[in-house]
Amino acid sequence: MLNRTKAHSRRGSVSALALIAAFAASAAQAETAPAAPAAPAANATAPAPEDQTQKSDIAEGSDIVVTATKANELAPVTASLQTTQPQAIVSRSFIEDSLPATADFNQIALITPSVSNYGGNNGIGLSESKAQIRGFQDGEYNVTYDGVPFGDTNDPTHHSTTFFPSNTIETLVVDRGPGNASQLGQATFGGTFNLFSRATRDTFGGSLEATYGSFNTYLGRAIVQTGKIDKLGGASAVFTGQYVHSDGRSSYSKYENYNLFGKVIVPIGPDVTLTLLGTYNKNHFNQADSDGSTLGQQALFGKYYALNTDPKTSEYYGYNRTVKTTDFELVKLEANLAPGVVFENRAYTYYYDNETLSANDVTTLPGAIYTTTTNPSGAAPATPNGNIPGYTKTNKYRVFGDIMKLRADLTSFATLTVGAWLEFSNTYRQQRDVDLTTGLPNYIEKGVTAPATGVNPGQVTPRNIKFDQNSQGNHTEEFVELELRPIAGLKITPGFKHVDFGRKIDATYNQTTRYAQRNANDYSADLPFVTINYQPVSNLSVYGQYAKGFLAPALSQLYVANTTFSNAVPQKSTNYQIGAVYHGSHLSLDADVYVINFTNKFYSYTDTSGQGLGTIFTNIGGALYKGVEAQATYAFGNGIAVFANASRNYAKTTVYIDPVTNLSVPRTAIGKAPFATAAGGVLFKRGPYRFSLTDKWTGAQYADLKNTIRISPYNTVNLAASYDVGPFRVGLDVTDLLDSQKVNQVSGSQIYYQPGRAITGQVTYKF
C-alpha cells in the first residue's frame, strides 16, 4: 500500500543510524524476533513474523501500513515501519475509547510526542485551541484532510472547532517534519497534522450516541454504514452527524455545534474508484474576539470569568457572539492505468465564514465609563456617554484546488512519482465600528484621505470603517520523487519540489492604511528532499531525512502604504532527522533525533528615518530547533498495555541585529515552546470492557519571545471507562481527573488556565 502522508526525516551520519539500529536490534533480540531471512530479490518485501500482518485498523483510512501486533492493537500512538520521518499515528479506537466526544483534532494530537497546546479554556472542544509541534506555532505547520491542505487564506492558521470535529476523523497522523516532495501545503515547515476521514465498512451498521456532562454539555451523534451495495457495483457509504450544546467552563460562554458528514466510494470497473466526500459545520458561541480575563477581573469574579449579563459593561454576553459556517467537498479518482501505473486526482473546495460581533476591550473592571464617538466627523461627546464601543467583523473565503499524482514502476527497483497542486482562493474581510448600546455606527477611527498616488486619490474614509478588502491567492507546486530499492529492505527516495505562491489585494479600504489599494506580491522556492528507510529485519527499520521547508509571508505584508520598501522573502528551514521503529509481538518502540535550522525570520518595524516609509516588513536572523523524541507501548497479552512517550526540545532564536536600534539582540527561547513533553498511561481492552488512564505533561515554557513571563509545567490526567451490555455501551470520561487549574497561556494582561475537571457520561447504541 502507498503511504500517502509520505513520512519526512533528515539526513544524519551513518554512525548515528548504526547506533539507533543497534539499540532497536537489541530490543528485537529481547523480544525473540525471528532472524532476518535470506535476502530475496531487490524489489521483494521482507516477510512478517507469524503473529503479524501487513495491515491493521490502526491507521485505517490513511493507507499507512502498520503491523498488527498486540502492542499496536492497543497503542494510543505508534509509527509505521515504512516511515521516513518521525511520526505518530493516533488510532480511531483511542479517539473513541479514551477521549470525550467533543475533542477537537488538537486534543487528539496532544497525546503524541513534542505536541503541546493552549486555548480550549472553555472546555475540551468547546472553544478554539492552538497546537504546537516542537515549538512551531499554528501557521508554521500544515493541517490536511484526506491529503488536502486547508487553512486560512491570510496566513495558513487553523480553527480547531470548525470543519472537522472528531466524528469526521478516522485516524490522525502527526508528521514531525516538512515532508517529502509529495507532502503538500503552504507551511511545509514545522510538520503536518494529517486528518483522515471516516472509513466505510463492508457491512451495514451504525450507532447512536448521547452524552451529558459538566458545564451542562450534551451531545447527540449518529453514524450509519451502508456496507457494500451489490446493486451499485459494490459501492459503500458512511454518514454521520452531531449536535453539541454547552454552557461552557467560562462564565456565560455558550457554545453550539452542528455537523453533517458523508462519504461515498463507488467502484467504476475493476481498476477505477471514485470517492465523493462532503461535510458541513456550523458553530454558534458567545466569546469576545480577544477573549480572556485579567488578574483584576479574576480577583473579583474567579479565574474562569469571561462574560456577564450586564449590558452596561463590555463583557455583556449579548455584545460578544460569533457564528462560523464551513463546508468542505472532495472528489477523488483513483485509477490503475496499467500494471505498475497508478493515477490519482483530488478536486476539492472549501468555504469559511466568520461573522463576529465583539466589544473592543473586555479587560475593564466594573464602573468603567466609555467615551463613545457617535459623530460622523469624529468629534467626541462633551461628556462620556458610557455607551459600549465594539465592532462587527467578517472573514469569509472560498478555496478551489486540484491535486494530481502519477506513480509508475520504472523497473523492479525504481518507482517514479510526479504530480502537481493547483489552488485558488477568494477572500472578503471587513471590520466596522459600532456603538453596541445603540446598534448605530461608531465613528471612532482617525480621519484618512487617500494619497494622490493612490487608487482613489482624495477619497475620504468613513471613520467607522477599519477595513473592507478583497484578496486572492494562487498557489502551485510541482514535484517529483524517485524511490530506489537497490537491495532488499532498502528504500532511498530523492525528490524535488518547486513552489510558486502569489497574493493580491483589491481593497476599498485596506487594513491598517484604511484607503483604497491594489497591492500584490509573489514568491517562489525550490525545495530538495532525500529520505532513506532500511529494514534489516521484518520488524525493525531505521530512517533518515534531509529536507527543505518553506513558509510564505502572511497577507499582512500588503497592509502597508508602499510595498516597495519591504523586502521580506519566505522563511526557509533545513531539516535533518534520523530515527528507528521497532514492532515486536508485545513491544512497539520508536525514537528519533532532529536538528532544524530556519532562516529569514519575519520581522516588521515602523520606519523612524523621517522619510515617511511607514511599516516595513523584512527578514532578520532565524532560529534553531533540535531535540530527541521517543515513544513505546508494551502489551502484556491479557488486554492490558502500558505506554509512554517523551521529548526534550530546544527552540531558540539566533543572534541578529535590530534594524531600528542597530544593536545585537541576544538569543532567546521561542515563546509558547515547551522545553519538554511527556505522556504515559495504562490501557485495558478485553471483551466488553474498555479502560484507560492517561497523563500528558507539558514542560516549562516562556509566554513571550522576550522571555519575561515563564509558565510552569502542568499536566492533565484523563480517565475513561466503558462497558458493553448487549447492543449498548455505557461509559464515563473524566478529563483533568486531578482538577489541575494551572496557567497555560498568558497574552498581554489576560491570563488563561486549564479548564479543570470535567465529567461526562455516555450511552451508545450499536446496530
Image (cartoon, rainbow, N blue to C red):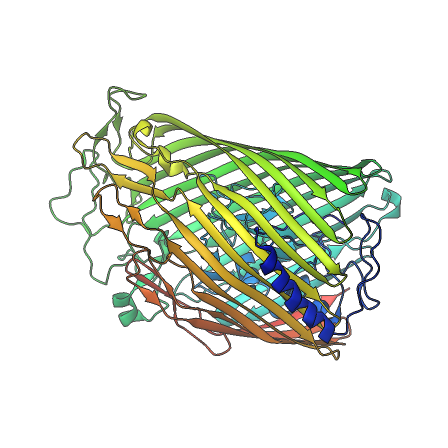
Give the percent coordinates (x, y) of residue 358.
Answer: 35, 50
Does 177 appear above or below 508? below
Closer to the camera in the image, 194 or 752: 194
Q: Is residue 126 among what the camera can see?
A: no
* Total marks in image: 0
Residue 210: quadrant of the picture: bottom right
Looking at the image, which residue is at 54% across and 55% down?
257
Give the percent coordinates (x, y) of residue 131.
Answer: 48, 57
Left/right placement of residue 94 relative to residue 381 reads right
Does 7 appear above or below 52? above
Left/right placement of residue 501 relative to residue 91 reads left
**Which residue is farthest left?**
382
Left/right placement of residue 346 relative to residue 120 reads right
Closer to the camera in the image, 620 or 445: 620
Residue 435: quadrant of the picture: top left
Left/right placement of residue 49 relative to residue 72 reads right
Give the percent coordinates (x, y) of residue 580.
Answer: 64, 61
Does 80 appear above or below 146? below
Closer to the camera in the image, 101 or 520: 520
Closer to the camera in the image, 375 or 349: 349
Give the percent coordinates (x, y) of residue 87.
Answer: 61, 57
Does 21 appear above or below 659? below
- Give the quadrant of the C terminus: bottom right
Looking at the image, which residue is at 32% across and 32% down?
566
Looking at the image, which residue is at 82% across and 68% down?
51
Residue 29: quadrant of the picture: bottom right
**Which residue is farthest right?**
230
Q: Is residue 545 among what the camera can see?
A: yes
